[in-house]
Amino acid sequence: MDKLIFSQEFHFPVQIYYEDTDFSGVVYHANFLRYFERAREEIIGAAELKQLWQEQQCGFAVYRCDMICHQGVEFADTLDVRSQVAMESQYRSVWKQAIWRQGANRPAVTATIEMVSLGPDRQLIPMPPQVLARLQQPCQG
Amino acid sequence: MDKLIFSQEFHFPVQIYYEDTDFSGVVYHANFLRYFERAREEIIGAAELKQLWQEQQCGFAVYRCDMICHQGVEFADTLDVRSQVAMESQYRSVWKQAIWRQGANRPAVTATIEMVSLGPDRQLIPMPPQVLARLQQPCQG
Amino acid sequence: MDKLIFSQEFHFPVQIYYEDTDFSGVVYHANFLRYFERAREEIIGAAELKQLWQEQQCGFAVYRCDMICHQGVEFADTLDVRSQVAMESQYRSVWKQAIWRQGANRPAVTATIEMVSLGPDRQLIPMPPQVLARLQQPCQG
Amino acid sequence: MDKLIFSQEFHFPVQIYYEDTDFSGVVYHANFLRYFERAREEIIGAAELKQLWQEQQCGFAVYRCDMICHQGVEFADTLDVRSQVAMESQYRSVWKQAIWRQGANRPAVTATIEMVSLGPDRQLIPMPPQVLARLQQPCQG
């Protein structure tokens, strides 16, 4: 994937609550995928996602995720989810995402996540142009 | 609700995994509602629920739940979810549900949960007859 | 509970993501308890909760919750969780909480939730004074 | 990882409930990691995991997971989670896990998951011998 051209980096904050942890005292690993997803939805836009679904029954699905948990994340942490995206084809986007704890000098969790665009019958469709435009916008905040 | 005629008691087992607990060492309270829901789905039948949704866009929604957590539930516990149901009207079922830890002499969690039947536009509809029949069947297992 | 003196109303925003919904198209009911909990943690303060746990093994547990779901909450909704709290005794706080969808003229979900303070052996303890002080502070934001 | 010697295949059933799906109509992707975890806990043994935690503050953490979602999993599905495990070192186990829908001729989800054993300070420790023994036992049921 070396030839992919990645977007600038988007930032998304996540606060860790009771519900995110398990009895071992740190965040349950599957939850990291939820934070990555929230960040992607924020970048694409929740209203856009809803409209695409309602008008065209078009959605997105995770095809692959490869995640490494370098360090535990704790209750009350405030996380910075950092995301960059590239189009691998018109059907598939590749996201490099990382979770940073406040004050850390390396990420706690890193992941490469591949998303596909799906139509009404869950068949592959090209990424809708309005979403493409969002992903190539300068980031805010 | 004294005049309601409740069904016999159904039993449903739940095993507690990492994902169910939080850092305080016990099950996160909102999860109890998930176990009660699983038990209700098992009683009504997952296949029946799916068919009702696909053919008639008919589903069920929790209207009210009143839950008391008497005691913490721990990792590795095997729970017995006990359920009784009564029809309050043709639109609404009332469920008395309780979570028992193995070997306990009183329930860890008790709840009264009211469910309504909803049609395609989320309007109230009478409980479908095949579901009514399931609820009045002798229980299995 | 008519004689309880409730605090001013705190506001807490919740964005609804894919993870919050189920196949019926609306938010899964148990998740509302998670949003209420997040709002309470924000009011008490995540850092304070962490410190109490680490230094005194003191925490909070939901003893009872009585929730009514008046209306479905949808994907991409931005919610306002409104909370008021009163002390019923030195051990127990009572929270009146409600979930408002944007632009609504009545809440989608309302709940009364009773919390108790627990010590290292999960025995009842008086609410720690620093938490009491937080709950009686003027709200921010 | 070609030289790793994998155990026989363990089977673990998972029933899909409302809570597992999202509004797109299929299982939310992060939940697959929960099913894989449940299967691993069942193989190692919940009681053993609890005892290790209470007596030695020893636990397990996911270090890496690489998951591919080939096909959507639907409400009311009954899944067969198939797992094989190999020791990569005394600290790290590698799990090949797959989710099969009933009647399918290929898995819906496949994953390679690396687990590490952690001691009281979340430092790497060798896999406890009683767990090693469990993983090398002939599987049941």
Image: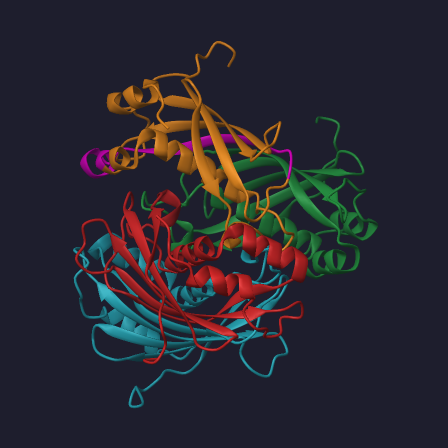
Chain colours: A cyan, B orange, C green, D red
Residue, far right? C129
Across and down, in percent, residue B92 comes to 39, 22
The total of numbered circles placed on residues is 0
Q: Quadrant for the C terminus of chain B, please.
A: top left
In this picture, residue A15 sits left or right of residue C54? left
Residue, far top? B3
Q: Residue at x 77, y 47 (%)?
A: C119
Question: Which sits in the foreground, A124 or B86?
Answer: B86
Q: Is A24 situated above or below B43? A: below
In this picture, residue D112 sits left or right of residue C8? left
Q: Is residue B63 magenta?
A: yes
Q: Is residue C55 magenta?
A: no
Question: Which sits in the foreground, D45 or C58?
Answer: D45
Q: Residue at x 40, y 60 (%)?
A: D33
Question: Which sits in the foreground, B47 or D110?
Answer: D110
Per the rendered image, the range of residues in magenta is: B51-71
Q: Residue at x 32, y 46 (%)?
A: C23
Q: Is A2 situated above or below B25? A: below
